[in-house]
Amino acid sequence: MKNTVFVCQNCGHQSPRWLGRCPGCGEWNSFVEEERITRAKPKRRQAVVPENRRPVRLSDVAASSCERRSTGIGELDRVLGGGLVPGSLILIGGEPGIGKSTLTLQVCDRQAAAGAGVLYVSGEESAEQLRIRAARLGIKGDSISVLCTVGLEDIVEAAQSLQPGLLVVDSIQTVFSSTLSSAPGSVSQVRECTAELLRLAKARQMTTVLVGHVTKFGAIAGPKTLEHMVDTVLSFEGERFQQYRLIRAAKNRFGSTNEVGVFEMADTGLVEVTNPSRFFLSDRRENVSGSAVAATLEGTRPLLVEIQALAARTPYALPQRVANGFDARRLSMLLCVLERRAGVNTSGQDVFLNVAGGLRIQEPAADLGVVAAVASSVRDAAVRPDCVLIGEVGLGGEVRSVSRAADRLKEAARLGFGSAILPRRNLSKKLDAGVEVFPADTVRQALEILEVVR
Ligand SMILES: Nc1ncnc2c1ncn2[C@@H]1O[C@H](COP(=O)(O)OP(=O)(O)OP(=O)(O)O)[C@@H](O)[C@H]1O
Ligand SMILES: [Mg+2]
């Protein structure tokens, strides 16, 4: 029998011959030849969590292990659902250079200061490199043990002898087990090494953080089963040329996946941004046409962002519609609504839209902000600077209701805004706004209130 097998790098599906398209997940060109796993099969499949052979009553199970330890970084605690759960396995994925190692080292420092033993395993950087980074971040590191290895067996041995409260493996794609003959980073290596680390984490009640690479499509490299195996998957986002970084939970067995942590990358590492709205509005110039402030939601937290638009007569037959941080097709739709329902014509004009700060908005509640910014640029009339815009725009030109209107208004009041335009259906007696609220039924009405359209 041939000693190699073709394995789908996306889902782990195996085939004796190369296939163009994986029958398991439908991915194209994902099969890579790997050596068969030569390890002798264990008699009984080893479970990844401590087993109990007899059923026990759920209420009798001790819940003490659910106590969380704060990471010492508030924004990260928010995403994790309150802190680190002992014995949990956390996977952090993100683009190269986004700050994964920086963040994990900062967590190590806070955990070491809190008295938890910390073991930092690096398969990518030398101990000297780690030392230089630690010095830059102002981390002394006298309670952090460092191990530079890619061998799974070395990691397990060190973890068993040191018994740390926190183990960091940077990165899981570099780790390999000598009992498997496939190459490091291959599906079988990543899966088996993660399973072994999971067993260790659960058996020793040791929080384990795995750093993961991402593919060019932004998904975590390795088999999809990797994400199923771990308790929490965090993804690191941010623009290369922007200072801010966002951390979201793509999956969390111990908390909500709605929360987002906001950080700023500085010389001294990742600094928490506890007031993101102020951060994203910091460069705003008031009384300039083509600028509007929208109240969006990032997770459950309201976030005020500046939306900028510029419309100008095009020299080309086909006008350009360019959107940064906003869906370009949705922009085209909103331009049509503006033309047909509010009489603001952009045909024959190039339209550029930008969400300031490099943020990406996916929420439709920012529609009214986009429409106001474009209309303001077309008419060259500035939007009232103290007004926040909230509302989804429908094809009929109607302003549709949004979720959590009260939270958005509260954030606007907190940042010193004086008024807000709100979908009329969101208006209720209970709404304790703190700002003057102008209800709007249609886009035209909203633009009239803003005095952009008369
Ligand atoms: N001296 C410095 N001053 C400011 N920022 C720095 C400095 N050195 C590095 N950085 C920032 O730190 C980032 C690298 O962080 P880090 O090594 O934690 O990323 P990573 O996600 O672990 O990358 P990789 O995928 O390569 O391991 C750089 O992209 C840069 O933004
Ligand atoms: Mg790194």
Image (spheres, rainbow, N blue to C red):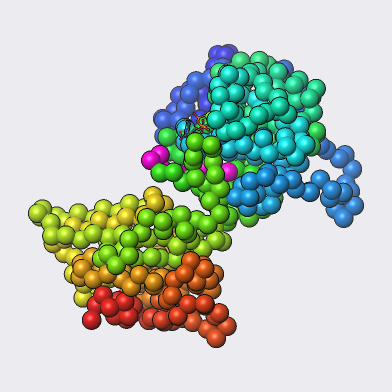
Q: Is residue 328 magenta?
A: no
Residue 124 shown left or right of residue 20 in the figure: right
**Residue shown at the point (67%, 28%) measured from the top left:** 141
Q: Nearer the viewer, residue 60 or 5?
A: 60
**Residue 38 visible to the viewer:** no
Q: Position of residue 319 (x, y in %)?
A: 16, 56
Q: Position of residue 70 (x, y in %)?
A: 71, 47
**Residue shown at the point (44%, 66%) measured from the top left:** 295
Q: Reply above or below: 362 against 194.
A: below
**Residue shown at the point (66%, 52%) measured from the top left:** 81
Q: Position of residue 77 (x, y in %)?
A: 65, 49
**Residue shown at the point (13%, 60%) measured from the top left:** 313
Q: Reply above or below: 187 against 434.
A: above
Q: Is residue 236 magenta?
A: yes
**How many numbered circles are shown?**
0
**Residue 33 visible to the viewer:** yes
The quarter of the image holding the N terminus is top right
The magenta-colored residue range is 234-241
Q: Nearer the viewer, residue 47 or 153?
A: 153
Q: Reply above or below: 202 against 260.
A: above
Q: Quadrant of residue 256?
A: bottom right
The quarter of the image holding the C terminus is bottom left
